[in-house]
Amino acid sequence: MRKFTFLIVAVLAMFTATANAQSKGDMHVGGTLGLRVSSGASFSITPEFGYFVADNWKVGAEVGYTTAGNRFSIMPNAAYYLRIVDKLYYTPGIAVGAGFAKGANSFNLDVRLGAVEFQPVKNMALSMSVASLTYARMHKTDNVAFTLLYSPTIGFRYYF
């Protein structure tokens, strides 16, 4: 019985030690690639930087470009990292910012509900987002959309 109790305590200690892979003070650089297929295909690229202000809480910024309308964007963001299994995290987040295109500036709000990250090795991760709720205001016109597998993104992050 003692050996079993010791084994349980050891396993729980190892789990707790690895559960906070994103600790306060950690940073990352990376970016995402996106593809949207509707009436015409568009491609996006978004470099980003993130800083963990507390364990599992990240704030960051991304600067993006999309071929749809030749649009640039600047989006401060925040995300929470929730460990699902060993190296897989659910990373819901929010981004608020502005989009810029010739004669068509906009305000954007993006609630990222379907974001996950896989960390196969200590300092590198692959991210994916497949569902989000977005709001955009352009020229006094509001646009609200829920996207599920409509404009997925794939990303890479390097932690230091």
Image (cartoon, rainbow, N blue to C red):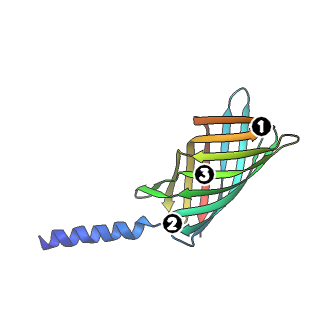
- Residue 127 position, x and y percent, is 56, 52
Q: What's the amino acid at mark 1? A: Ala
Residue behind mark 1: 68
* Image position of 9 (left or right of 122): left
Question: How many other residues sit within 10 Å of disc 3, few (<14), some (14-19) or many (≥20)?
Answer: some
The label on residue 14 is: none
What amino acid type should be assigned to the residue bearing mark 2? Gln
Q: Residues within 10 Å of mark 2 (few under 14, many from 20)?
A: many
Q: For the point 59% across and 46% down, which residue is it?
A: 111
Q: Label 2's element?
A: loop
Horizontal and vertical percent position of residue 37: 67, 31
Q: Residues within 10 Å of mark 1 (few under 14, many from 20)?
A: some
Image quadrant occupied by the N terminus: bottom left
Marked residue nearer the N-terminal end (1 or 3): 1
**In the image, which disc is placed on residue 94?**
3
Q: Position of residue 126 (x, y in %)?
A: 56, 54
Q: Are marks 2 and 3 in contact (CB under 8 Å)?
A: no
Q: Which residue is mark 2?
A: 22
Residues at marks 1 and 3 touching, judged by CB atoms closer than 8 Å: no
- Judging depth in this view, the residue of 23 and 76 nearest the camera is 76
Q: Nearer the viewer, mark 2 or mark 3?
A: 3
Do labels 1 and 2 touch, CB within 8 Å?
A: no
- Secondary element at tag 3: strand
Q: Earlier in the sequence, mark 2 or mark 3?
A: 2
